[in-house]
Image (tube, grey):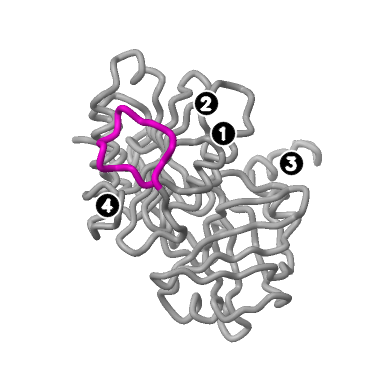
Amino acid sequence: MTPASRQTQRMNDKPHRGTIFLEDATVLETEAFAGRQFRLRLRAPRCAAAAAPGSFMHVSCDAALPMRRPMSIMRVSRNEGWVECLYKMVGDGTRLLAQRQRGDVISCLGPIGRPFAPHPERPRTLLIGGGVGIPPMIFLAEALRGDARARWQPLVLMGSEVPFPFEARPSALPLPAMPKEASASMPLMEDWNIPSRLASLQGYTGCYRGYVTDLARNGLGRLDKKALAETEIFACGPTPMLKAAAQLAQEFRVPSQISMEEFMACAVGGCAGCNVEVRTPEGPAMKRVCVDGPVFDGASVFPIN
């Protein structure tokens, strides 16, 4: 084997080399919402330039904590060089992160992971986000809005059992396939002319009372065969929601892509601490959520037996 071929082999063995950047990001904005939720905007131009819907960052929360925290990317501006994420304060790391102020510098590693891959032959994209799984759906919706490969028809469904991190408003975009009681929407989606609906068990005004996957079932059940043949599901959220979304897709015979959430140590594939079992043509295999995912085919992770 020649030196050049050995180099090519090494690059093939490490497909993520040269695509993940370590940079000192500057805090541009931070905003607190009910339910201990926080929006964080960082100036991280290298990450912003390479990020895609479904990818994430590994963020250093504080110098006293050696372990980074994975953060889903919600929005980016490639021109202005910023990256935005939404997170919930659940432990010491995110508690310290929530104390960061404008101008503070945070070490970021990203973008990491295999992103969503919408198929133009299935322009009816059903985006399902639950809790802190909502941010990748916002990123994906914005990407579809700017993608001229197909006449995308995204529908964004969001579920939360804490107050949504935005002030919901009645939708001006009619959706005959949705229950009439589901009238609340995300204002940002309305501004983008993308229909959205909200679900919760908490009785929030205008929200469908139930799980977001129940709301999705309601909509899918009203589609004819032609519409279903043009439909693909994308989901991110807690594991039970992902399982329900993946199995719902199989029930209606539509493909699904799910973004997994797992605890991570290195987030670059070295420790294999975020392994999940995935069904492959060769049989069951353990895959790393950080670099083999976080996006997987839904049926490969949660098959209906």
* Residue 76 placement, left or right of 207: right
Q: Which residue is mark 2?
A: 152
Task: Count neighbours of disc 2 (C-alpha within 10 A) and say few if under 14, some if 14 to 19, many if 20 or more.
Answer: many
Type of the residue with mark 1: Leu
The answer to whether marks 4 and 1 mark residues whose Cβ atoms lie closer than 8 Å is: no
Q: Which residue is mark 4?
A: 240
Task: Count neighbours of disc 3 (C-alpha within 10 A) and say few if under 14, some if 14 to 19, many if 20 or more.
Answer: few
The answer to whether marks 1 and 2 mark residues whose Cβ atoms lie closer than 8 Å is: yes
Please report the residue visible at 53 percent of the width from the left and 35 percent of the height from the top: 193
Residue 196 % position (x, y): 42, 41
Is 244 magenta? The answer is: no
* Residue 259 appears in the figure: yes
Q: Nearer the viewer, mark 4 or mark 3?
A: 4
Q: Which residue is mark 1?
A: 144
Which region of the structure is painted magenta?
170-184
Q: Which residue is mark 3?
A: 6
- Cα separation, mark 1 vs mark 2, equals 6 Å
- Could you say which disc has been placed on residue 14 in the image? none
- Cα separation, mark 3 vs mark 1, equals 39 Å
User: Helix or strand or loop: what does disc 3 sit on?
Assistant: helix
